[in-house]
Image: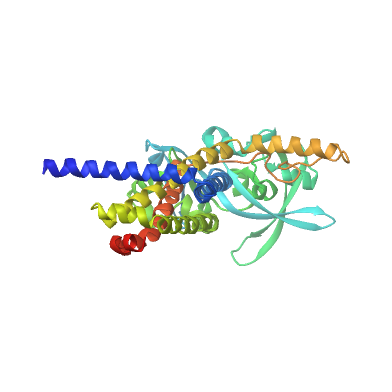
Amino acid sequence: MEFYLKVRVLVNSWIIYTAFRHFKTKRREKGDTSTILSIVGILSGVMTMITVIGVMNGFQGNNIDKKVEIGSGHIVLEPIDSKATFNPETVSLFPEVDSIYMSSTNITASTDIRDGEMMGLQVCSVPDNILDIDKSFKDMIGLKKGSFDLSGENTIVIGQSLSYRLRLNVGDKISLLSLTSHNGNSFEPKEIEFSIVGVYRSGSLEYDETLAFISNDSAMNHFTKKENFTYKIKIKNRNRYQYTMNKISKIDGLSSMYSIKSWRDYNTSYYNALKNEKDMMIILIGLIFLVVGVNIYNSLRRSVYLRFEEISVLKTMGVSSFDVRVIFILESFFIGFIGATIGVVLGLSIANNINAIFDVLEVIINNILSLFNGSSVSLYGSQFFYISKVPVKVFFNECFMVFIAAIFTSIIAAYGASKRISSIKPGEVIRNE
């Protein structure tokens, strides 16, 4: 057994050595650019995919963070019984819970833009001291002017885009029109005047243009009843929501009075839309690997054809068809590994420095334009996009999967191209020569 293992190691070492020598010799051959083109193709595919996925992760993560930290919370308790009662201190004692507070997010109102033209608003009620209670909300909300102190009567905080559109600032008044039911059947319009105490800029145009914040007391006085309020829960790691939800569901009587939803449940349609968008983009960019795989396949088929004599000599010496095929597969592995490695390095470099690259390109383009008409352009600026910088998030598992996919494509192409080796008969080849 020991002798067999030693022989097998020597054979494998010989195969690797031959494959590497074949790879180096092939690169030196004049006019043979297929290997270089294959490496460049894999390099380009990996680099493009990592850069695009990193930017997509940045944009999608930025949007999801805003929706979760400002909007839904990590876990939401919604009343399903009008007599629902709940002691939030029970949950606040859980070690993984950061904060829990009452809120109402189902308030809709309208405000007058100009000359009777109305605009719909989403009004969210929060505790007066929300910035002290919820640190992640404070980090995301981006207060620009005034304060977030909602302790005063009929005070409100609006988004920067809404303040520009209505031409309002801190200290001004804004009137909200809402339909209020007194007997449960009929609704009548009710106009309430609020004082603007703060202006925020979250970076989400959807929120900054249509979402306003009032206190829970103001919401109960003018818009909704206390039994309609939900409880928002923030935990230290929002991806471990299921663990906390299971603990909450075990509290006596709570499941019969409240529905327990996670941030994924609350944003299911939006989250799935982003996931489908990302999957389609990966498929489209992945077509680059398909093209490169075809190129490697044709290149190796040509290489097998040109080396009929060498393959026949090896077979005559007792080398099996499988071992000869492994030589060509290893050659393709070298191509995939080199291209994928360089592609990962370049992809990470571009993704992590995308904003600096935009700045350099902008300077170069503007310098060229200044030689002709003196005009200037902005590749990525706040005048065209709502955020001033491109957000980027690169995850190790995604980079690793792209790296493996590139190498796997090369190996599969080589496996298909080397099938012809099994049909080569050394006697016929040597006799024909």
Q: In which quarter of the image is the C terminus?
A: bottom left
Colour logic: rainbow
Place of residue 276 in the rendered image (x, y in percent of width and height, measured from the top left): 52, 58
Residue positioned 51% across, 42% down in the render? 343
In the image, residue 236 lies at what x, y percent? 43, 37
Q: In this view, does 430 lie above or below 16?
A: below
How many numbered markers are drawn? 0
Confirm whether residue 14 shows in the render: yes
| The furthest residue to the right | 373
The foreground one among 85 and 17 is 17
Residue 398 is at least partly visible in this image:
no
Q: Residue furthest bottom?
A: 185
The reply, left or right, for residue 424 in relation to residue 35 is left
Q: Find residue 303 and report its image quarter.
A: bottom left
Q: Where is residue 224 in the image (x, y as percent from the top left)?
A: 59, 53
- Image quadrant assignment for residue 381: top right
Foreground pick, 86 / 405: 405
Seen in the picture, residue 352 relative to 424 is either above or below; the reply is above
**From the image, which quarter does the N terminus lie in?**
top left
- Residue 168 x/y as whole percent: 78, 42
Residue 194 appears left or right of 259: right
